[in-house]
Amino acid sequence: MAEDVTFTPAPDSGPAYRQLRSLLHAVAISMMILTGTMFIFIYREVVLIRRQTNEFLTGISEYERTSTQKLIEQLQVKMGEYARQHPDFVPLYVRYFGTNGPSPVALGTPVKIPTNATPTPAAKNKGP
């Protein structure tokens, strides 16, 4: 049969053993405090991110619900026309609107929908 094996410290290691045990307990308690602090920090960050996400989604839905997008596109069209008439305004127009023109929807032109279709070999071979 198996004998019960128990740890018994050497007789002369009493204070060192107690000091090592106290140090181990202090490290374990410190790790528990650190883990709890990190948990609270991460929890607060998650709550903050959820709140900001809800505010952001509310703002997006309000933006889509109102006619703000159309107003911005109309402003861009009017500014583009003004830039064509006044060349000294072009640097400001390019700075704030970039090189992108207004969307085709804002101009009232039909929008070509891109497709991923590849041309057929018969279409490639058609010539004059």
Image (tube, helix red, strand yellow):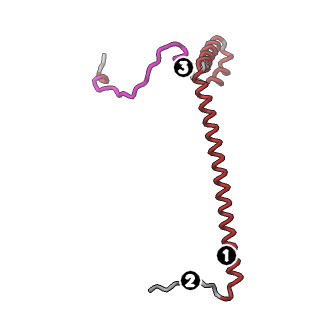
Which numbered disc flags the more N-terminal residue, 3 or 2? Answer: 2
Residue 84, above or below 35: above
- The residue sitting at 65% across, 46% down in the picture is 45
Q: Is residue 81 left or right of residue 118?
A: right
Which numbered disc flags the more N-terminal residue, 1 or 2? Answer: 2
Q: Residues within 10 Å of mark 3 (few under 14, many from 20)?
A: some
Q: Residues within 10 Å of mark 1 (few under 14, many from 20)?
A: few
- The residue sitting at 66% across, 72% down in the picture is 24
Using the image, tell me which numbered label, if any, was put on residue 6: 2
Using the image, tell me which numbered label, if any, was put on residue 103: 3
Q: Is residue 123 left or right of residue 79?
A: left
Look at label 3 and name its amino acid.
Ser
The answer to whether the residues at label 1 and label 2 have Cβ atoms under 8 Å apart is no
In the rendered image, residue 27, in percent from the top left (x then y), is placed at 67, 68
Q: Main secondary structure of the magenta part?
A: loop
| Distance from the alpha carbon under mark 1 to that under mark 2 | 17 Å
- Which quarter of the figure has residue 15? bottom right
- The residue sitting at 58% across, 83% down in the picture is 7
- Closer to viewer: mark 3 or mark 2: 2
| Distance from the alpha carbon under mark 3 to that under mark 2 | 81 Å
In the rendered image, residue 115, in percent from the top left (x then y), is placed at 40, 26
Which numbered disc flags the more N-terminal residue, 1 or 3? Answer: 1
Disc 3 is placed on an element classified as loop
Using the image, tell me which numbered label, if any, was put on residue 114: none
* Residue where numbered disc 1 is placed: 21
In the rendered image, residue 76, in percent from the top left (x then y), is placed at 61, 18
Task: Choose between 94 and 109: the one closer to the eye.
Answer: 109
Part of the protein shown in magenta: 101-122
- Closer to viewer: mark 1 or mark 2: 2
Point out the residue furthest to the bottom here: 11
Q: Residues within 10 Å of mark 2 (few under 14, many from 20)?
A: few
